[in-house]
Amino acid sequence: MTTLAKIGISGAGVIGQLHASALAGIDEASLVAIAEPREDAGRELAGKYGVDWYPSLEAMLASADIDTVIVATPSGLHPDQVIAAARAGKNVITEKPMAITAEGATAMIDACDEAGVRFAVIFQNRMSTDVMKVKRAIEWGLLGIPILANGTMYWYRSDEYYAANGGWRGTWALDGGGALMNQAIHTVDMLQWMMGGVASIQAHTATLGHDIETEDVASASFRFNNGALGSITATTCAAKDYPVRIEIIGTKGRVTLENNAITLQECESELSDDLLTPEDHELADGWADGEDFGLAHRRQLRAILHHFADGTPAEVPGNEARKAVDIILGIYESNRSGTRIMEDSQA
């Protein structure tokens, strides 16, 4: 079987481990190296998969036989690492959020374009049959005129979670935000993706349950580019993790997703697999309600690597991935200024 890519992962934390496991299930991918400044963690992950360990991204770029880098480090490090990999001539895949500032996102995209390398960002929650069916149903008008689109994410994160790995989570410098930028960014992304982007934002955020710099509670209202209204509410202070919920209401019906699976549909016709394009079927192949965490990463990674090899647009490119970041930055600005923020996010 032809190898699509020889890959190095930057970061041996939870997400780096997840990517290594996902790649192990892709026959066409070859994991070659791990870059991690914490020697014990780096050697442990590299040893598990029989690959080389390097103490830094720079060392891996200089010595490892790789053509693709996966960036799985704290969010605030993503821009510098993506830019370094691009300038070394490597294709790049980064975890969400791609950046924590608009300037960082722009610099990453520009660096990859200037170097002539490919760039994609992980938003694995899009890789669900039911999520894709809802998007296509909106496009086909099966819900009528879109009226409302609301998302909720009520999760629990402990003080120990925020203190782990040097305490980078919940900081502005490395996390870039809290419950929104780290966790609910997936829900923000799916709302804007389904509804064609966000036109304006009005928001409040607060820190109510943790001793952190950033928000652990947020509520924002949107006007979408298609004219519909909507909202996102999110927290990491809930008693436990509740299902992430998205509800779309139109003039002809409504549909609800919980953890990426349709739990309610009231439409003129059933939201069947016939709505999906051939590309949708390929991306969601193997999806199952309640699947283990990491399988959607595997589907997106496989798709990205095939697109990189074919020279076709990847799932999800930088210009698309930055939309969720820009929306969350708009939420933060609305909270700071007490004003409505106008966005130009387009699908």
Image (tube, rainbow, N blue to C red):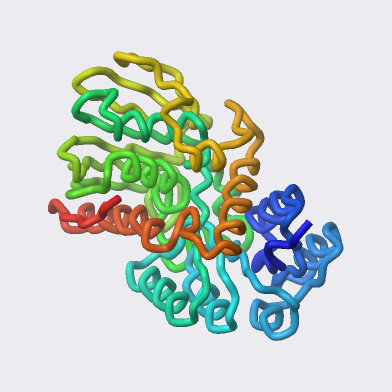
Give the side of residue 43 with respect to residue 260, left or right: right
Give the side of residue 37 with respect to residue 209, left or right: right
Which residue is found at the position 37% from the left and 35% from the top? 135
Q: Position of residue 249 (x, y in %)?
A: 26, 24
Q: Is residue 171 visible?
A: no
Which residue is found at the position 29% from the left and 14% from the top? 268
* Most distant residue in the left direction: 339
Which residue is found at the position 54% from the left and 62% from the top? 94
Q: Is residue 253 above or below residue 5?
A: above
Q: Position of residue 270 (x, y in %)?
A: 39, 16
Q: Position of residue 346 (x, y in %)?
A: 26, 53
Quadrant of the drawing holding the N terminus: bottom right
Which residue is found at the position 17% from the left and 55% from the top? 341
Q: Is residue 324 above or below residue 318?
A: above
Question: Residue 158: which quarter of the image?
Answer: top right
* Relative depth, front residue between 97 and 272: 272
Question: Residue 101: which quarter of the image?
Answer: bottom left
Q: Position of residue 259 (x, y in %)?
A: 50, 30
Q: Is residue 269 visible?
A: yes
Give the side of residue 201 with respect to residue 32, left or right: left
